[in-house]
């Protein structure tokens, strides 16, 4: 890896930890954390209960039921589908309110589209 790339990753990890510490301070059992991870080819979303450290619901472009619909998972359209799917699964599990954790990524592009799709599908954050 290039030195600039490594420094960019380190800066994102620092932002992630800073954001996560603020979110976890607000953690309550009634408001779990919706976290996002994006790679070049895929996007992942999880709803995590930080009080017990357990993943309650997850969705990604690599899920079998979404893989056929999406095709390429590294674009905005795929992020919107994952956002709607995570909201659908969360509502089935009885989760309506969450805290959004963007994991140090800018609230732009795929991360923003995932959040908007989850809101439209019924999640409150």
Image (cartoon, rainbow, N blue to C red):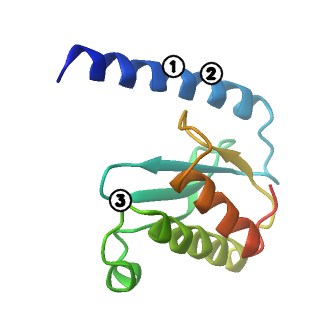
Q: Quadrant of residue 102?
A: top right
* Marks 2, 3: nearer the viewer: 3
- Residue contact between numbered discs 2 and 1, judged by CB atoms under 8 Å: yes
Residue 31 x/y as whole percent: 79, 52
Question: Which residue sits at x=57%, y=38%?
Answer: 106
Question: Which residue sits at x=34%, y=80%?
Answer: 64
Figure check: 105 above or below 78: above
- Residue contact between numbered discs 3 and 1, judged by CB atoms under 8 Å: no
Figure check: 26 above or below 62: above
Secondary structure of the residue carrying numbered label 1: helix
* Residue occupied by mark 1: 14
Q: Residue 42 bears which disc, if any?
A: 3
Q: Quadrant of residue 91?
A: bottom right
Question: Which residue sits at x=65%, y=78%?
Answer: 88
Instruction: Return the disc, 2 or 3, that comes first in the chain's sequence.
Output: 2
- Residue contact between numbered discs 2 and 3, judged by CB atoms under 8 Å: no
Question: Which residue sits at x=73%, y=27%?
Answer: 22
* Residue occupied by mark 2: 18
- Side of 82 where 26 appears, left or right: right
Secondary structure of the residue carrying numbered label 2: helix
| Marks 2 and 3, how far apart at CA | 24 Å
Instruction: Return the disc, 3 or 1, that comes first in the chain's sequence.
Output: 1
Specify few, some or many for label 2: CA neighbours under 10 Å numbering under 14, 14-19, or 20 or more: few
Foreground of the two, 21 or 121: 121
Residue 4 x/y as whole percent: 29, 17
| Marks 2 and 1, how far apart at CA | 6 Å
Residue 65 shows up from this direction: yes
Figure check: 85 above or below 46: below
Specify few, some or many for label 1: CA neighbours under 10 Å numbering under 14, 14-19, or 20 or more: few
Foreground of the two, 26 or 69: 69
- Side of 1 where 41 appears, left or right: right
């Amino acid at each position: 890896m290039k030195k600039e790339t490594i420094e960019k990753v380190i800066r994102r990890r620092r932002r992630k930890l800073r954001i996560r510490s603020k979110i976890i301070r607000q953690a309550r059992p009634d408001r779990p954390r919706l976290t996002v991870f994006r790679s070049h080819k895929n996007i992942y979303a999880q709803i995590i209960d930080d009080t017990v450290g357990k993943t309650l619901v997850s969705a990604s472009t690599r899920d079998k039921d979404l893989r056929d619909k999406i095709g390429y998972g590294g674009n905005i359209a795929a992020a919107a589908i994952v956002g709607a799917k995570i909201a659908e699964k969360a509502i089935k599990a009885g989760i309506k309110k969450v805290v959004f954790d963007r994991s140090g990524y800018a609230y732009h592009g795929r991360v923003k589209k995932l959040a908007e799709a989850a809101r439209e599908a019924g999640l409150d954050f």
